[in-house]
Image (tube, helix red, strand yellow):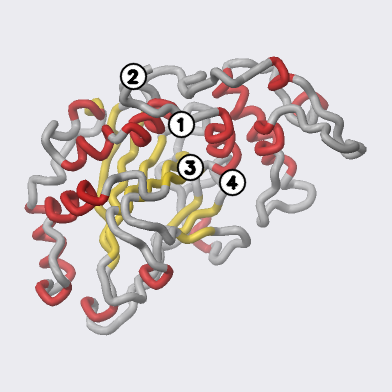
């Protein structure tokens, strides 16, 4: 392991496998957040003439380079840039390595800017439709998307909404646009320097900005170039990880391994019966990450 990386542990990886999302609050230092905002050309709202003018200013900046798809992440950003420093933060570098390996390639990146009503002619911009991002490949291998929030995001700013546990449902990416306000959905409200690492299949959309400030979110999609098997810190995976616990009639103190409990924890939108299919999806996904098809949780995969 690179000494400058803090790899994810088993419970963090299980959380990602079960919910498709891992959140690190305020992990990017304040000075680096401020440098990123300066680099992209952030200015006070009073200095912005229009939405197009502000986007033009940002896109004309060299702070966010134009990077061809497939470029190795290590070569995507100049070494002295804020972006290079952000992906090198030990917790960030460790999360990237744990999810997509030590040498991922960049699919694309984009700076999302959500404007407040006073910069859009007094009209509140609608929230983005619910969607997945380019999920055209149903195999277990997955891309990871890193969403970086360089400043504090309040509820009024309409932070990205997402539906935990939706990532393993295979759908046509925009067909879910008709679904709104699903039980259990979350909206990002966070301190500056927060990152959200998501599976490419997570259902999500941008919120509507009702504040008086601009909201920024910088997204990087990364593709693995190696098998995603035990890339995280698996030092605490003992023999009990593969032991089955009693189910239904359980008694007291019968939990064997915390990963099993995480993988069969329901989400508010799960139905009583078909929601159980998500447990099997999660177990199969964990087997892929583990590199061992003998693993099971509450006997779901074994009994079928």
Q: Please state which of the two labelled residues, at mark 4 or mark 1, is closer to the viewer.
A: 4
Where disc 1 sits, the SS reads loop
Q: Earlier in the sequence, mark 3 or mark 1?
A: 3
Q: Earlier in the sequence, mark 4 or mark 3?
A: 3
Residue at which label 4 appears? 165
Q: Earlier in the sequence, mark 4 or mark 1?
A: 1
- Cβ–Cβ under 8 Å for marks 4 and 2: no
Residue at which label 1 appears? 142
Q: Is residue 43 above or below residue 166?
A: below
The residue lying at 20 percent from left, 40 percent from top is: 83
Q: Is residue 205 above or below residue 8?
A: below
- Extreme-bottom residue of the structure: 122
Q: Alpha carbon of mark 2 to alpha carbon of mark 3: how far?
A: 21 Å
The residue lying at 43 percent from left, 61 percent from top is: 189
Residue at which label 3 appears? 22
Q: Nearer the viewer, residue 197 or 82?
A: 82
The residue lying at 28 percent from left, 50 percent from top is: 218
The reply, left or right, for residue 99 in relation to residue 221 is right
Quadrant including the N terminus = top left
Point out which mark residue 2 bears: 2
Q: Where's residue 173, x and y in %?
A: 47, 48
Numbered disc total: 4
Q: Please state which of the two labelled residues, at mark 2 or mark 3, is closer to the viewer.
A: 2
Q: Alpha carbon of mark 4 to alpha carbon of mark 1: how far?
A: 15 Å
């Amino acid at each position: 392991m690179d000494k400058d990386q803090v790899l994810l542990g088993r419970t963090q990886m299980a959380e990602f496998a079960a919910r498709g999302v891992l959140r690190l609050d305020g992990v990017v230092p304040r000075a680096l957040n401020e440098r990123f905002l300066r680099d992209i050309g952030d200015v006070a709202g009073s200095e912005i003439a229009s939405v197009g003018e502000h986007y033009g200013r940002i896109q004309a900046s060299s702070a966010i380079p134009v990077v061809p798809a497939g470029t190795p992440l290590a070569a995507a950003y100049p070494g002295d840039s804020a972006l290079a420093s952000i992906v090198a933060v030990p917790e960030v570098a460790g999360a990237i390595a744990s999810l997509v390996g030590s040498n991922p390639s960049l699919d694309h990146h984009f700076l999302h800017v959500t404007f407040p009503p006073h910069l859009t002619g007094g009209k509140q911009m609608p929230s983005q439709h619910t969607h997945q991002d380019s999920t055209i490949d149903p195999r277990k291998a997955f891309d990871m998307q890193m969403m970086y929030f360089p400043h504090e995001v309040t509820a009024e700013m309409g932070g990205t909404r997402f539906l935990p546990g939706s990532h393993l449902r295979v759908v046509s990416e925009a067909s879910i646009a008709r679904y709104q306000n699903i039980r259990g959905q979350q909206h990002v409200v966070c301190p500056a320097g927060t990152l959200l690492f998501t599976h490419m299949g997570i259902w999500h959309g941008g919120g509507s900005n009702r504040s008086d400030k601009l909201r920024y979110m910088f997204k990087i999609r990364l593709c693995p170039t190696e098998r995603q098997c035990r890339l995280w810190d698996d030092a605490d995976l003992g023999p009990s990880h593969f032991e089955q616990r009693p189910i239904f009639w359980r008694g007291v103190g019968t939990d064997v391994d915390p990963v099993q409990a995480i993988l069969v924890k329901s989400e508010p939108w799960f139905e009583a019966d078909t929601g159980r299919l998500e447990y099997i999806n999660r177990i199969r996904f964990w087997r892929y990450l583990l590199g061992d098809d003998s693993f099971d949780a509450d006997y779901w995969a074994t009994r079928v």
